[in-house]
Structures are given as C-alpha cells and as structure tokens.
Image (cartoon, grey):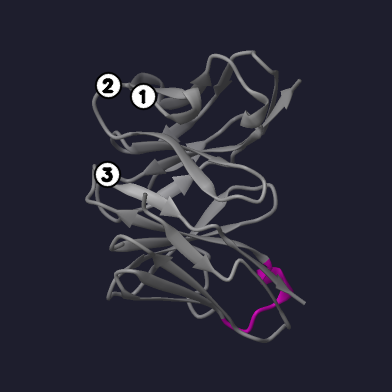
Amino acid sequence: AQSVTQPDIHITVSEGASLELRCNYSYGATPYLFWYVQSPGQGLQLLLKYFSGDTLVQGIKGFEAEFKRSQSSFNLRKPSVHWSDAAEYFCAVGATTGTYKYIFGTGTRLKVLA
Amino acid sequence: GAVVSQHPSRVICKSGTSVKIECRSLDFQATTMFWYRQFPKQSLMLMATSNEGSKATYEQGVEKDKFLINHASLTLSTLTVTSAHPEDSSFYICSAREGNRGHEKLFFGSGTQLSVL
C-alpha cells in the first residue's frame, strides 16, 4: 500500500521569495505523483503530475516538482511566490498496479507575507 | 475541460436521517470514482473506491453499512450517509478518474459540507 508524508504542516514565506514544499512517499515501485492546491472554499486543483519520463515536471502557475527516486521524494518548488499562492497544498500518490487508489498527504498550509 | 459536479454543496440534517450525495462526471465517462472525507484543516481521507457496475472497495475503518456507495453508471456515483450522527459531520469530496492507467486524470467535485444536528 502506498503512503505519503508532508513533513511541514505550515510554511510562511514572504512574497517574492522562493518556495519548496516537501513530499515523501512510500510505495513498492515508482508511483504516480501529484500536487494539488486547495484554496479556502474551493475545490482541489491539479498543479502538476508525474507518471514517467523527465523527473522535473512543470506545472501551472509557475510551479515545478522534481521526482527523486533515491530519496522517495517529490518536492514542489516555485522561484517567486505571489500572495495569491496562499492556500493548502496536497501531495498525492497513485498506485501504478492493482487497485486504483490515490492517497493524499496531510497537506501544507502556505502563508504569504506581503 | 472535464468537470465533476457534486451535489449538494451543503446539507444540514437531523440526527438519524439519511443523506445522499451525488457525484457526476459531466463530459467524460468515469470508470472509477473515489470518495474522500476531509476534516477541518486536515487532509483528504480516502473512504472508498467505486467502479462502475461493481461493489465499492472500502478503506479500513470505513463502515460499509454506514456509507453506502452506488456507481450505477459511468457518469454517476452516489454516497449515502445512513442514519447520520453528529460525528458524521464533515466535508465529503468525490473525484472521478478519466483515462487509462498512466494517462489518467483525476477531477474533483467541489465538495459537500454535511452538518448533522
């Protein structure tokens, strides 16, 4: 069974600063990996995903993530944060074999200081 | 783009009543739908995986008789919270998978806030 850990519950950065949100997973093989953002009162929006191939994945809103097999990680990055990026970010892991299942991490709440 | 419609967005009910939540994929066929539960400021907890035409697969600790899931067609899945109690109050989110493994996309409904009095 897969699992995913987001070590940081809260992160605060200043607007314009760089951002890295951590995600570590546990799975018997290379899983499918996703990052979602949830804004207050809104649904989940997919930022980016990794299925295979290039380990550096570009997403929407200037986000990118890098899959590192040796570290079982899929950290999300953004070079310059905007105030509108304040939200809850979830990393998710999808099974590549067997039953379709997507497991979400506990989330990281991002606060952006003006 | 693909849209998942979840209805109702908010429901308040009395303890002991049953509540049905609908999840529809509007412009694609979803062979698999997922139901999640989210407590305030917490993550999404997978409750069950629903495949069209077959019984749902429930996660450990989720009561099958409490949370009835029906996936009768490729575009509709329903979650019925039976004999709801205050501890069932939560935010429920459905998602639908489009495409085959390795090329799939997952779309989410906007969620249903259930409040049981």
Amino acid marked by disc 3: Thr
- First in sequence, mark 3 or 2: give its number: 2
Q: Is residue B58 left or right of residue B39?
A: left
Under circle 1, the secondary element is: strand
Residue A26, horizontal then vertical, whole percent: 41, 36
Under circle 3, the secondary element is: loop
Q: Is residue A80 left or right of residue B46?
A: right
Q: Residue at x 25, y 52 (%)?
A: B99
The disc placed on residue A96 is 3
Q: Residue at x 58, y 71 (%)?
A: B8
Q: Note whether B3 is above or below A60 in the view shown.
A: below
Dominant SS in magenta: loop
Residue corresponding to mark 2? A54
Residue corresponding to mark 1? A57
Residue A62, horizontal then vertical, whole percent: 48, 23
Magenta run includes residue B83: yes
Other residues around mark 3 within 10 Å, as few (<14) / some (14–19) / many (≥20): some
Question: Dots 2 and 1: beta carbons under 8 Å?
Answer: yes
Q: Is residue B10 left or right of residue A73?
A: right
Q: Residue at x 68, y 18 (%)?
A: A15
- Mark 2 to mark 1: distance in Å? 7 Å
In this rendering, the label closer to the viewer, 3 or 1: 1
Q: Note whether B63 is above or below A67 in the view shown.
A: below
Magenta stretch, residue numbers: B82-89
Magenta run includes residue B2: no
- Mark 3 to mark 2: distance in Å? 17 Å
Splitting the image into 4 quarters, where does residue B76 fall? bottom left
Report in which chain the residue with disc 2 lies.
Answer: A
